[in-house]
Amino acid sequence: MKYNFDEIIPRRGTSCVKHDILNKVFGSDDVISMWVADMDFKSPDFVFDAIKKRCEHEVLGYTFGSDSYYDTLINWFDTHYSLKVERQQLHFIPGIVAGISFVLLAFTNLGDSVLIMNPVYPPFINLPQKNGRKLSISRLNIENGRFAIDFDDLDKKARGCKLMILSNPHNPGGTVWTAEELRKIAEICNRHGVLVISDEIHADLTLPAFKHVSFASVSEVARNNSITFIAPSKTFSIAGLSSSASCIFDATIRDKFYGFLDNTEIANGNIFAYTGAEAAFKYGEEWRLQMLDYLQGNIDFVKDYLKEQLPWLKAVMPEASYLIWLDFNATGLSHQELKEKLVKEAKVGINSGLDFGDGYDGFFRMNVGCPRAVIRQALENIKLTF
Ligand SMILES: Cc1ncc(COP(=O)(O)O)c(C=O)c1O
């Protein structure tokens, strides 16, 4: 079966974060929405079929994750991340951002420090800060068009921290961290007694030329000092189902975290979260591979367009996922001027770099998880504006 990712599906009027709160986010509804990491592709039929089938039963009562749900996760960990996982090592999580908050609450106290690598997905910055924790920030450098870790700096910044929140692959910029890079992170964190959250929500969006490396797979040290989060949400266009899962190998960390989740009852699933995730991971491989080919086509399209039409606009091109980190600094405009021109003249709604950490003036993040015609229009608008 060939899926059609060129189809434009109007999403306005569905309480959709990406398209229905543009005025609040950008001060205008009249922008091409390319911000939050949500794709505009139709959610797959096999997910709808499973949910519809469940709806044929007339009682939507309390529901737990079935053996078949957990077996599907176990199989996905084995086939996609080379990790042999047991049922007891897994837990349902109602969204990874919530999961990160739960870890903050269970493993850190007010005033503790949390290690992150900027620029990074805004909740990694906001969750610790808004909950009375301190941030210790190691800044990534752009080397040969890819984010690179300064390990000496990471080592210094890890000192005194309780927790590291790692985006693996990285958001923004879609860096697929190598086994060697992950091994070094694991060694540094272990030496300083820093527990690692490996947020692998973008793992299954790793582009065809790259291979995702799961943090827990790189060494014993990584395996025994980490909490891994995965989710079908981004990959299969089903973020609204709020379905994700954690995996913990170390029994002490697991007892503490899963004990916290169970004693507080804050991580119970719901019928559609289980049903949708199981269907996605059970039947989704062909759809996923075709979608990734399409995404690669989008990224190649942007790469060629920038090279030919906007050579001054520098970009970190993703190795995973559909987020492109753009550097508008060659325009010589201030960040505020750029924001205004992008919204009012180019009519393009992309994320401000300043949401990903201090000092990213002139940077913006563009989401190309959408039909190619939308990207073409946005780039043409940018070309006409600058
Ligand atoms: C790195 C990362 N983690 C987590 C999330 C969101 O996860 P969830 O919707 O499961 O809370 C995103 C969404 O953009 C993300 O990029």
Image (cartoon, helix red, strand yellow):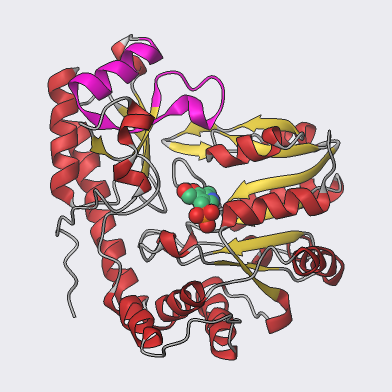
Residue 218 horizontal/vertical position (percent) = 67, 63
Q: In this view, does 46 lie to the left or right of 359?
A: left
Q: Is residue 114 above or below residue 141?
A: below
Residue 216 horizontal/vertical position (percent) = 68, 64
Nearer to me, 117 or 241: 241
Residue 139 horizontal/vertical position (percent) = 61, 30
Q: In this view, does 372 lie to the left or right of 354?
A: left
User: Which quadrant would the N terminus be assigned to in this image?
Assistant: bottom left
Q: Does residue 237 appear anywhere in the picture?
A: yes
Nearer to me, 108 or 210: 108
Q: What residue appears at the point 76 percent right and 34 percent down from the top-left corner? A: 132
Q: Does residue 101 belong to the magenta stretch?
A: no
Q: In this view, does 92 lie above or below 111?
A: below
Extreme front residue here? Answer: 58
Q: Does residue 351 belong to the magenta stretch?
A: yes
Nearer to me, 248 or 25: 25
Q: In this view, does 93 lie above or below 130?
A: below
Q: What stretch is highlighted in magenta?
A: 334-363
